[in-house]
Image (spheres, rainbow, N blue to C red):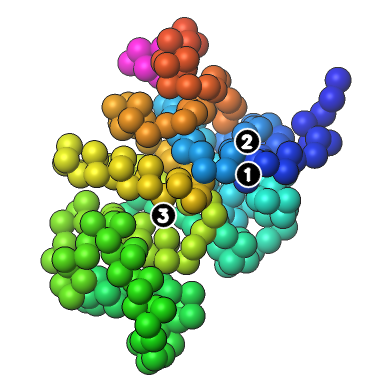
Amino acid sequence: MQQPKQTTARKDFVLSVEGLTVSFDGFKAVDDLSLYVEEKEIRVIIGPNGAGKTTVLDLICGRTKATQGSIKFKQKELTKLKEHQIVHAGVGRKFQNPSIYEDLTVFENLEISYPRGRNVWGALTFKRDQAVQDKIMEIAEMVFLSDKLHDQADLLSHGQKQWLEIGMLLIQDPELLMLDEPVAGMSVAERKQTAALLQSITQQRSVLVIEHDMQFVEDIADRVTVLHQGKVLSEGSMQRVKNDPKVIEVYLGH
Ligand SMILES: Nc1ncnc2c1ncn2[C@@H]1O[C@H](COP(=O)(O)OP(=O)(O)OP(=O)(O)O)[C@@H](O)[C@H]1O
């Protein structure tokens, strides 16, 4: 039988996770997981609490080190890299709570995130040349904040803060964007706008999302991976997984 760890990642997958395992004191939070994400795909990971969803994102972004297995991003092995090297390779990660600078304006938050000015001093003192300005305008428009550019970030609504953080990741031009429950706490209108935002992001990039809101998942997902006890329980279109008796039993039926 062919072992997953010995297979070679296909070139057209932006992300190939194979045989990924992490044990915490003998407990396998992620257990021999394989997952393949295509270019420009929106993949949603769903599953019950404790299934290992957040741990998978932690492993991909290097926050948690794998016990076994491989994570290839465009042929580059991520399990050997440090968190900042993974960001540099083109993987952006948004956590559940927005980490924006509340006392800076929307413009300044985006400017600080521009790759040329990674630290606060560098970002605030470097010349605001036209290319940076143009990029900030483009991203602000994409994340529905062009009329808020000069507002201080703490004045934004919860949803707008989430969009700003997505904008701060987009300005770094990642090829893979990972989002942990991006619409939690958002209004219905904001959820719809976020779905549109993800569609526009995947014109150029791939997105990996953890989400519990099934309507949102249905609106955005190209494919859905259902995790259960650290393993893939089911995978495919939303239509397919929501009719899968195993998924209904452990997750959707509750
Ligand atoms: N650093 C850690 N040390 C020990 N156990 C951990 C650690 N991180 C996660 N776990 C355990 O691994 C399991 C998977 O957790 P994880 O947060 O990935 O689940 P999840 O699917 O994201 O759940 P939820 O939907 O509740 O966020 C849980 O049982 C959790 O307690």
The answer to whether residue 73 is visible is yes
- What SS does tag 1 mark? strand
Residue drawn 58% across the image and 25% down it: 232
Residue drawn 22% across the image and 65% down it: 146
Residue that carries the numbered disc 1 in the rendered image: 15
Labels 3 & 2 near each other (Cβ < 8 A): no
Q: Quadrant of residue 120?
A: bottom left
User: Which residue type does callout 3 highlight?
Assistant: Lys
- Residue 92 % position (x, y): 49, 57
Residue drawn 52% across the image and 43% down it: 40
Cα distance in 3D space between marks 3 and 1: 17 Å
Figure quadrant of the C terminus: top left
N-terminal of the pair, mark 3 or mark 1, is 1
Residue that carries the numbered disc 3 in the rendered image: 94
Write down the region rendered in magenta: 247-254
56 or 221, which lies in front?
Answer: 221
**CB at mark 2 closer than 8 A to ligand 1?**
no
Labels 3 & 1 near each other (Cβ < 8 A): no
The answer to whether residue 28 is visible is no
N-terminal of the pair, mark 3 or mark 2, is 2
User: Closer to us: mark 3 or mark 1?
Assistant: 1
- Residue 202 % position (x, y): 45, 46
Q: Which mark is residue 36?
A: 2
In the displayed structure, 117 sits above or below 220; it is: below
Cα distance in 3D space between marks 2 and 1: 6 Å
Residue 248 falls inside the magenta stretch: yes
Residue drawn 29% across the image and 57% down it: 143
Prevalent SS, magenta region: helix
- What SS does tag 3 mark? strand
Labels 2 & 1 near each other (Cβ < 8 A): yes
User: Which residue type does callout 1 highlight?
Assistant: Leu
